[in-house]
């Protein structure tokens, strides 16, 4: 009996040691790849949520497209689990829970109110971003100050603005598909606009701060690129305000609106990639 308890204690101790040292043992490349997988998961889930909202609002999205979106998200979650050695078991378990929640939501998503479904997926994406921020802190705690700052901007600043742009794109596309903005949707769009503008200011500030501190590592054209990016984001917001947030019927092509939103998210991700290259 005593020998059995001692054996179990040894197993528990080995498991604890593995959890403690798994993060520190991960290479810089492993850490970058893991963060990139989280980013990919967030972006894929945003697209799935947006396409589903258009579908539920009567837009031109096929059931095959919805199935493909679900499959892409499932694959991304499985890929994260395969990289479990990069992080501790707690983090891997949290993403495993998200996977179960995602599968449960996918099973009933088309039976729920569009707004209910949209908010449910948004909650899951928010959890992904929170987990991503925690992972970044844990993974880079022993790396240089530069690595810590750059990776923090990637997960704490750049990912959140892609999400608020994704909300604006997904909710707005549903409005264009339906032809009018219901009160609950209009209120949500107004909130998303405020969030995007706040995130936009923070992104520009953080990127300028990094480029000032590490001048040789960022392109000299960064400020002009950021100014152009700001104009494009505000142009999209004006489109929402002028064409969607009004009392008349909406006359905006759903495909064009969704494509413009996707283009903005892609532009945002260029700053993620820029910082990712610095980590490498």
Image (spheres, grey):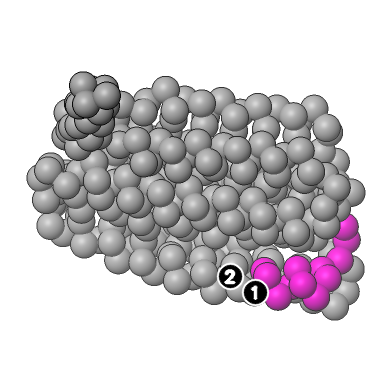
**Image point (76%, 60%), residue name:** 115
Q: CA distance from mark 2 to mark 1?
A: 5 Å
Residue 232 seen in the figure? no
* Start-end of magenta stretch: 176-189
Residue 55 inside the magenta-drawn segment: no
Which corner quadrant of the image does residue 99 belong to? top right
Left or right, residue 29 beside residue 168: left
Eyeballing the image, is 79 above or below 42? above
Residue at the limit of the structure toward the bottom, as seen here: 247
Give the quadrant of the N terminus: top left
Mark 2 — residue? 193
Residue at the limit of the structure toward the front, as seen here: 1
Local crowd at mark 2 within 10 Å, few (<14), some, or many (≥20)?
many
| Image spot of residue 241 (x, y percent) | 68, 72
Eyeballing the image, is 276 above or below 166? above
| Image spot of residue 71 (x, y percent) | 65, 27
Left or right, residue 186 beside residue 81: right
SS for dot 1: helix
Q: Are marks 2 and 1 in contact (CB under 8 Å)?
A: yes
């Amino acid at each position: 009996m005593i020998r059995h308890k001692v054996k179990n204690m040894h197993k528990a101790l080995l498991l604890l040691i593995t959890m403690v040292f798994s993060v520190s043992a991960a290479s810089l490349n492993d850490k970058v790849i893991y963060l990139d997988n989280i980013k990919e998961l967030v972006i894929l889930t945003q697209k799935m949520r947006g396409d589903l909202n258009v579908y539920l609002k009567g837009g031109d999205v096929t059931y095959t497209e919805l199935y493909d979106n679900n499959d892409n998200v499932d694959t991304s979650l499985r890929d994260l689990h395969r990289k479990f050695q990069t992080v501790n078991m707690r983090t891997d378990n949290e993403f495993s829970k998200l996977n179960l929640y995602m599968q449960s939501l996918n099973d009933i998503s088309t039976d729920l109110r569009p707004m209910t479904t949209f908010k449910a997926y948004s909650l899951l994406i928010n959890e992904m971003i929170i987990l991503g921020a925690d992972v970044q802190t844990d993974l880079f705690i022993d790396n240089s100050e530069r690595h810590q700052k750059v990776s923090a901007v990637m997960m704490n600043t750049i990912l959140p603005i892609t999400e608020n742009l994704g909300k604006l794109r997904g909710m707005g596309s549903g409005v264009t598909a339906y032809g009018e903005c219901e009160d609950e949707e209009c209120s949500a769009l107004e909130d998303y606009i405020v969030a995007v503008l706040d995130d936009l200011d923070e992104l520009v500030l953080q990127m300028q701060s990094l480029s000032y501190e590490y001048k040789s590592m960022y392109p000299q054209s960064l400020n002009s690129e950021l100014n152009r990016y700001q104009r494009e984001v505000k142009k999209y917001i004006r489109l929402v305000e002028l064409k969607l947030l009004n009392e008349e019927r909406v006359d905006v092509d759903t495909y064009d609106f969704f494509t413009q939103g996707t283009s903005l998210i892609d532009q945002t991700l260029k700053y993620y990639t820029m910082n990712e290259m610095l980590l490498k």
